[in-house]
Image: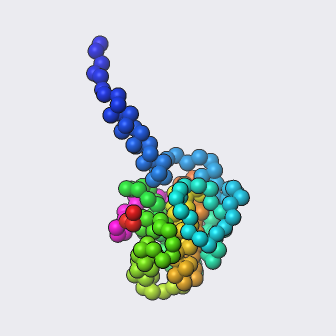
Amino acid sequence: MNMPRFPTRPLAVALAGGLSCLLLCGHFTARAADADEDHDWGVAATSQLRRPPYSAPTPREIPGGKVITTAQLRDRTQAQTGGAVMLIDVASGDGHVTLADSLWLAGIGRGTSFLDPAQAYVAEMLGKLTGGDKRRPLVFFCVNVQCWLSYNAALRAIMLGYSEVYWYRGGVEAWRAAGLPLARAQPLVFRIE
């Protein structure tokens, strides 16, 4: 039986490109450490924005904000105690699954300083979303515990004077591992590249 021959080079290039996107965008099966939201790599907390690479071990705390665990977030969103929590997914990429009822603001964890265009964009978007209420509980999350984008986005909100800023370190992978509801992410507005 003659099998059709497919060009190997374009396939290899396509596979390599797809793999790169999977790795860079966070669309991959979680390793055990990625779903372990309490994993300690010994990384010191910092109040400075992380520059690329954004996929690397993260600290266990965030200056000026609070770390929230999967169990705490589940309980808080189910009971909606202490004010309505706004869930903000900051993962990059073209699409993924996310926590149900979250807002996807792709790219707000990128950038180089608190004086860059991303900071102005975050100020504008959070102002609109919260109606200017800087006491509104905001929960920033990304793919997993090795994603600095949510850490950076939380720092941006803290710098803007929001007082109830939570960093959900475990992100989508910890939420998925707990069997909690996910939905297809829909970008709220344009991304920052």
**Residue 73 in sight in this render:** no
**Residue 186 magenta-highlighted:** yes
**Image quadrant occupied by the N terminus:** top left
**Residue at 45% over, 74% down:** 116
Please say if 15 is above or below 60: above
Q: Residue 46 is drawn in which quadrant?
A: bottom right
Residue at (31% x, 28% y) in the render: 7
Q: Residue at x 66, y 67 (%)?
A: 45
Left or right for 176, reference 184: right
Residue placed farthest to the top in the image?
1
Type of secondary structure dominating the magenta stretch: loop
60 or 177, nearer to the observer: 60
- Specify the quadrant of the image occupied by residue 130: bottom left
Of 59 and 112, the residue lying toward us:
112
Which residues make up the magenta segment? 181-190
The image shows residue 100 at horizontal and vertical percentages of 45, 63
Where residue 26 appears, x then y in whole percent?
A: 48, 52
Image height of 159 relative to 69, above or below: below
Q: Position of residue 13 (x, y in %)?
A: 37, 37
